[in-house]
Image: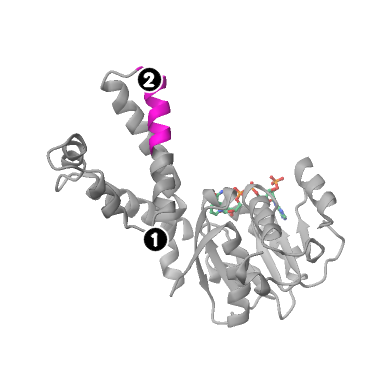
């Protein structure tokens, strides 16, 4: 049981038990959330989720669930309007809403859910599904310190949580860690492509690229050293790695500039989608 398990809520409703909701639910149970305190609302739960709820004693779609300490919104953003009217009735004055809906601001949630008070807006990412996520989260002024600790206990069951000083930073978080896993997957594709161009059979290049990125990622995860130090440690002056890094770190058109442009484009798009 994790050290902040004592902050877990005693009652929680999960709205939307799809990919993200299902992963979060598994994480909560792993860190000690009591299954009898959890209710899942999803009009068309998968067979797997139905079985999971039955086996763990989790209430699935009860007729009128009591207002919980925490209500987690994990539906698709475009389903919010449809879900909102039914949800208003399940909110009590003590209920903290945690929303992971991309592009839905705290203001959007307040206007769709007039019975709401305390709201945490969080942006997790895909590796949350294996407990290695990176989540950025922001609060509204109604969130008490006890509620923030509750949200931290829940969100950190799937990886690290960074509390943001302002909701305005969510779009930048989306552009870095929300969309970031796709950049890394693309890096594997690029490295494999370059390996093929350098003469390796394509499948061999793919296997090497994949193992290299996951191995380097794991090394970074297990090390306390900054990435620049890890890079310098494997770069002998005048060696092969240095020759490649001279290209990647070339100013002004190297990877630094390209990554800035990519993240800026993602942030702009996040702002547009949030309206
Ligand atoms: N996946 C990611 O990497 C990621 C990262 C950050 C944030 N998010 C956010 O996480 C949210 C969920 O994404 P996801 O990939 O987990 O989507 P998903 O797999 O489609 O899950 C959404 C679930 O909600 C159900 N649902 C639909 N209407 C509902 C309602 N009125 N009440 C209760 N449940 C309802 C859906 O059922 P049906 O399938 O039958 O419609 C589905 O089971 C999104 O808002 C997304 O922005 C996702």
* Residue that protrudes farthest toward the right in the picture: 63
Where's the N terminus, which quadrant? bottom right
- Left-right relation of 96 to 60: left
- Left-right relation of 229 to 54: left
Name the disc covering residue 172, or none.
1
> Where does residue 232 sit, x and y in percent of width and height?
23, 49
Above or below for 147 versus 178? below
Graded by Cα atoms within 10 Å as few (under 14), some (14 to 19) or many (20 or more), the crowding at tag 2 reads some
Name the disc covering residue 202, or none.
2
Q: Answer with mark 1 or mark 2, whichever residue precedes in sequence.
A: 1
How many numbered discs sit on the rendered protein? 2
| The magenta segment | 201-212
Residue 161: tell me if it is visible.
yes
| Labels 1, 2: front one | 2
Above or below for 229 versus 140? above
Residue 203 among those drawn in magenta: yes
Residue 111: tell me if it is visible.
no
| SS at mark 1 in the image | helix
């Amino acid at each position: 049981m994790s050290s902040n398990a004592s902050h877990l809520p005693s009652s929680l409703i999960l709205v939307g038990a799809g990919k993200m909701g299902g992963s979060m639910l598994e994480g909560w149970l792993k860190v000690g959330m009591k299954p009898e305190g959890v209710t899942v609302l999803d009009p068309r739960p998968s067979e797997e989720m139905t079985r999971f709820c039955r086996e763990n004693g989790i209430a699935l779609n009860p007729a009128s669930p009591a207002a919980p300490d925490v209500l987690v919104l994990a539906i698709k953003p475009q389903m919010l309007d449809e879900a909102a009217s039914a949800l208003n009735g399940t909110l009590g004055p003590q209920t903290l809403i945690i929303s992971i809906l991309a592009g839905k601001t705290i203001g959007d949630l307040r206007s769709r859910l007039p019975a709401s008070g305390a709201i945490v807006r969080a942006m997790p990412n895909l590796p949350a599904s294996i407990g290695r996520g990176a989540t950025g989260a922001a609060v509204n002024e109604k969130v008490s310190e006890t509620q923030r600790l509750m949200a931290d206990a829940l969100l950190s069951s799937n990886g690290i949580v960074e509390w943001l000083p302002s909701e305005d930073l969510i779009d930048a978080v989306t552009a870095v860690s929300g969309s970031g896993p796709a950049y890394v997957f693309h890096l594997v594709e690029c490295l494999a492509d370059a390996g093929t161009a350098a003469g390796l059979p394509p499948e061999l290049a793919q296997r090497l690229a994949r193992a290299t990125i996951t191995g380097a990622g794991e090394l970074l995860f297990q090390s306390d050293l900054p990435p620049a130090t890890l890079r310098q440690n494997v770069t002998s002056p005048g060696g092969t790695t240095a020759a490649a890094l001279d290209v990647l770190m070339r100013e002004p058109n190297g990877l630094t500039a390209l990554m800035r442009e990519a993240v800026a484009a993602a942030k702009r798009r996040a702002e547009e989608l949030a309206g």
